[in-house]
Image: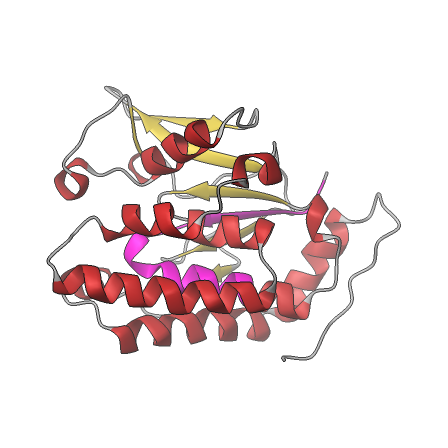
Amino acid sequence: MPVTFSFGGSGHHFPFMLGTAFALKTHFDIPWDEVYAHCISSGCSGAMSLLLCSPDEIEQLAVKGITLAHHSVQQSRKDYYVQLIKHLIPATAYRLVGDRLVIGTSEVPRFQASLHDTGYPTQQVLMDKLHSSCRIPLVTGSWSRELDGGFSHHYALSDENTIVITLKRYPRSDIAARKSSYFLEMLLPSAQRMWDLYEQGIREVEENYEALAVKIANGLRDTNSEVHFKPYR
């Protein structure tokens, strides 16, 4: 099985996901073009940046994303995470991710977990799935047959070596935010708290490096690749 990362969390905490992706790509020298990623419940910022971006590009996304979020909040836009997706994902993403990206949603009316893992024929199909993965009607003001994946599941597993990154800590989480301030960030987000979340994502990877290295090495065991640690910056 390939190395797989599963991102799940709140859109308001996208800097934590970006910080995690930045630290993973900074510290682990592995064939990233062979890595798979799952995104559940607004985890697409971490999943997409892990699949598509260099560490420098992830930092640029963080600056752009936090600036956009700050301006959107000042204009009382509650759906700024949807706007982030539109601005942060390149127009050729559907070709670049192929079938390496799995998007989790919840199918209504029974809110059953659904995983899309067959690739994306067009950019519009990819964007529709990403929007559905973080669609909460009270926030976005829209309904569809597929809603936020968090209504049915918090992460998805390919095998026992799937690396799980979540906002809240679950028994299966490998990386999680130490302190969840979901409602505070939703109601009173600030640029400083967003940057704190970004740095927290970096620290969590660094402090859990050994356990992560074991799982990554297990995922690479059927290839000629090895895990190499790279110093921070």
In front: 23, or 214? 23
**Up/down of 89 relative to 129, above or below:** below
Which residue lies at the image location 85% right of the left edge and 46% below the top edge? 223
Magenta residue check for 1: no
Q: Position of residue 42 (x, y in %)?
A: 36, 46
Which residue lies at the image location 55% right of the left edge and 38% below the top edge? 101
Display colour scheme: secondary structure
Which residue lies at the image location 69% right of the left edge and 65% below the top edge? 28
Which of the 4 image quarters holds residue 25?
bottom right
Asked if one can make out residue 108 in the rendered structure from this viewpoint, the answer is yes
**Up/down of 81 relative to 28, above or below:** above
Asked if one can make out residue 19 in the rendered structure from this viewpoint, the answer is no
Which residue lies at the image location 71% right of the left edge and 42% below the top edge? 2
In front: 73, or 11? 73
The residue positioned farthest toward the right in the image shown? 224
Position of residue 27 in the picture relative to residue 117 (left or right):
right
Q: Position of residue 40 (x, y in %)?
A: 41, 41
Position of residue 2 in the picture relative to residue 48 (left or right):
right
The N terminus: image quadrant: top right
Position of residue 15 in the picture relative to residue 67 (left or right):
right
Task: Count how many numbered circles sit on residues in the image.
Answer: 0
The residue positioned farthest toward the left in the image shown? 76
**Up/down of 139 relative to 80, above or below:** above
The C terminus: image quadrant: bottom right
Which of the 4 image quarters holds residue 132?
top left
**Up/down of 190 relative to 154, above or below:** below
Q: Which residues are magenta?
A: 2-22
Q: Position of residue 196 (x, y in %)?
A: 36, 76
Q: Position of residue 187 (x, y in %)?
A: 13, 62
